[in-house]
Amino acid sequence: MNMMLPPMLLTATAETAIETLAEVTGNENLKPGVIQNYLKDLPDKAFALLVKVVFAIIVIVIMWQAIKAITNLVEKSLKKTKIEDATAKFLASVVKVSLEVFLAFSIAAGFGMDTASIVALLGSAGVAIGLAVQGTLSDFAGGILILLAKPFRVGDYIVVNGAGIEGSVTEIALINTRMLTADYRRIVVPNGALASATITNNNGNTMRILDTMVGISYSADIDKARAVATRVLDANEFISDKYEKVVYVDELADSSVNLRIRGWVKPADYVKAKWSMNEAIKKAFDKEGVEIPFPQMDVHMR
């Protein structure tokens, strides 16, 4: 036969068991009065927490938009000065991150968290993370050096000596630099490598010398070859007429007399000028009968 105990008896029995457990463990928080008071205050605490959460969400949404507006304002204000766009974006990013960190700490303090402990924890974590991502930190430091020292700018055509990398700089970010090669391939180079490498900036000046070398045979007329090369220089649309154009004998090589043909071009037109000059010189020499020798071997048999 199943016997059902009255509810009041069950409650009394449960309270007795909890009191006995509290006495055995020595934990005062297990006493029925403490638990009842906690359950009684729980709705008020939950409501207060809910109000804080809702208020925090509202503050985050408003401040997030405010941070975005402030960042855009800072970036636009910097761009109006003589500062470069890449540097302006970098400084705007620093302002944005700083405001976001301040917002996070403010929200944490609003929930009653000890911000000093959070800072200490973040400091310890920062040391561990810094050891783990040394390469990324090196790239970040390299990005700052590039933005401050300005060895190149967006739009410059650079050559990373020893790495076989060259192209036009399209973006200078904090961690890496993006480049576009002559055949329109995109290259992403870590800033740490760029900051420590030897860089040839082909846009260092407003004009650049186009240097073309061509060999003629020893039996060819040097004056005629020079006149033909000069006409090719004058006819090239990329060669500037404002600067000196020269054609001279550079070397008496083993099987040819090497002529060096020089003219000034804009850095952006360098590749086009080089290709067009090579083709025009070959066609002009062939038309005028100026021989361009090639390696050959004479075999005498007895």
Image (tube, rainbow, N blue to C red):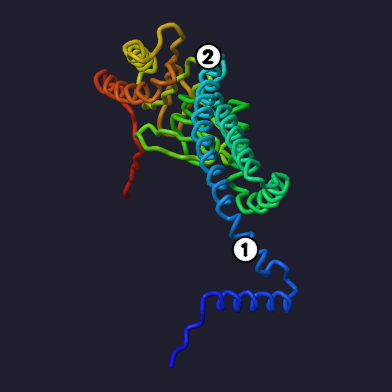
In front: label 1 or label 2: 1
Check disc 1 and report the residue beneath it: 36
Of 247 and 49, the residue lying toward us: 49
Q: Is residue 66 visible?
A: yes
The kind of residue on which mark 2 rests is Lys
Q: Residues within 10 Å of mark 2 (few under 14, many from 20)?
A: few
Q: Secondary structure at mark 2?
A: helix
Apparent side of residue 206 relative to residue 21 in the rendered image (left or right)? left
Apparent side of residue 3 relative to residue 182 in the rendered image (left or right)? right
Numbered mark located on residue 80 in the image: 2
Quadrant of the rendered image containing residue 143: top right
Of 135 and 272, the residue lying toward us: 135
Q: Residue at x 38, y 14 (%)?
A: 239
Quick check: 180 above or below 78? below
What is the residue that sits farthest to the bottom in this orientation?
1
Quadrant of the rendered image containing residue 215: top left
Q: Is residue 196 visible?
A: no
The kind of residue on which mark 1 rests is Gln
Q: Residue at x 50, y 36 (%)?
A: 58
Quick check: 24 above or below 115? below
Q: Residues within 10 Å of mark 1 (few under 14, many from 20)?
A: few
Considering the image in quadrants, where does the N terminus appear? bottom left
Q: CA distance from mark 1 to mark 2?
A: 66 Å
Looking at the picture, how far across and down is residue 265, in whole percent? 42, 16
